[in-house]
Amino acid sequence: MPSWIVILLLALLVWTPACAWLWLFKRRRTEAHHGLAALAGMRWREFSQIVRRAMVEQRGLAEPASHERGDRGTSSDFLMEREGRRWLLSCKHGRAYRIGAPAIRDLGAALRLTGATGGILITEGRVERDGLAAAAEEAIEVLDGRVLWPLLAPCVADDVRARVVGIARRQALRQTLIAALAALAVGLVAGVAWRAFQQVRPSTPAAVVPGAPAPAASRAAAPVPSAAHSRPADAPVPTPAEHLEEDPDPATLLRYQQAVSRALARTPGIISGIWLTRSTLSVERSVDDATAWPLICREVEHYPALRTARIQLNPRPGSGEPVRWRQCRTL
């Protein structure tokens, strides 16, 4: 698969959920944050009018005919009616409020004094956990900063609502662009890694499963070993016979002897071949004489200067055989 397709797919895979989160969740939280800030910046009169309108349109409450206020005598509490029953609304205007159980208990007492059926606490701040538990006991509905903006937004002036929505939308667009760049960067990194993997993979030898047949191409290319002997793959390639000296200098002779020793060490059935002197080769083997002798002579006779060397055949380990001396060729 081309690397650019991998880049696009990965970038799209990262960018799609990021966009969903930014527009479905983060944008709404941003809008609520700025909406609450706009509500908190209003005067009490304007805020209370928005609250009353929202209660009329969304909760079916209505202003009482007598326009009486709550018994607590504060401008933040007012009564509304629904089906002849009273509801006490308490507004805590401001985002700094952290309302706990004592304030809720106080509002519950005011409900009983005014004869209200239930109460609604409205604030741009937050009601703490103990306050929520107390509100459930006192039959008080809590509308704090976590849920207030979606409730009041339809009743806010159009220009204020448009400004809040515009701020949230612009921020979501900016974050979407950043997410697109980040997703593209992730895709580029992954694409480069994929390309490198594709280049390395052909040179990696395939794993060989024991007992599995070799591929046809490998069988065709592999050389067929002779029945007598199979030279190891890493053994040195012998120099053509016409290039070997019959009377070499000491350095060349030493090189010939080392080549024979290396070849014997790689030969199955031969443990080692060590030159004791210029013309004596000591051989350790694990096979019998009849098997070992052709293997030794094949390596020694390859070098004209070593063909008449004495071969010391040491006994196999634990066999008790005597040491034998032989020559591959005589003068």
Image (cartoon, grey):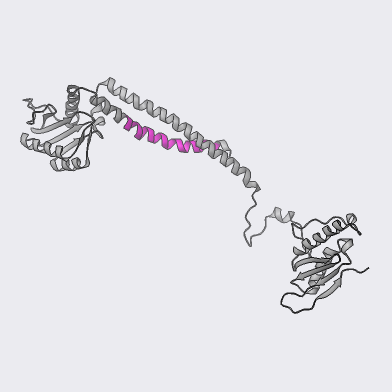
Residue 184 vs residue 307: left or right?
left
Q: Is residue 286 magenta?
A: no
Where residue 155 sits: x, y (%)? 23, 25
Where residue 274 sits: x, y (%)? 79, 66
User: Count the marks: how many?
Assistant: 0
* Residue 156 showing in the rendered view: yes
Residue at 12 percent of width and 29 percent of height: 77
Is 189 or 60 nearer to us in this picture? 189
Residue 314 vs residue 34: left or right?
right
Q: Residue furthest right?
A: 331
| Residue 219 position (above or below residue 317) | above
Q: Residue furthest bottom?
A: 320
What is the chief secondary structure element of the magenta stretch? helix
Residue at 18 percent of width and 30 percent of height: 92
Q: Residue furthest top?
A: 159
Q: Quadrant of residue 2?
A: top right
Residue at 50 percent of width and 34 percent of height: 184
Range of residues picked out in magenta:
5-30
Q: Is residue 27 magenta?
A: yes
Where residue 27 sits: x, y (%)? 35, 31
Q: Quadrant of residue 31?
A: top left
Q: Quadrant of residue 59?
A: top left
* Residue 6 showing in the rendered view: no
Is 191 or 287 nearer to us in this picture? 287
Is 41 or 146 nearer to us in this picture? 41
Residue 317 vs residue 154: left or right?
right
- Say which quadrant the N terminus sits in: top right
Is 201 or 93 nearer to us in this picture? 93
Where residue 126 sits: x, y (%)? 23, 35
- Say which quadrant the C terminus sits in: bottom right
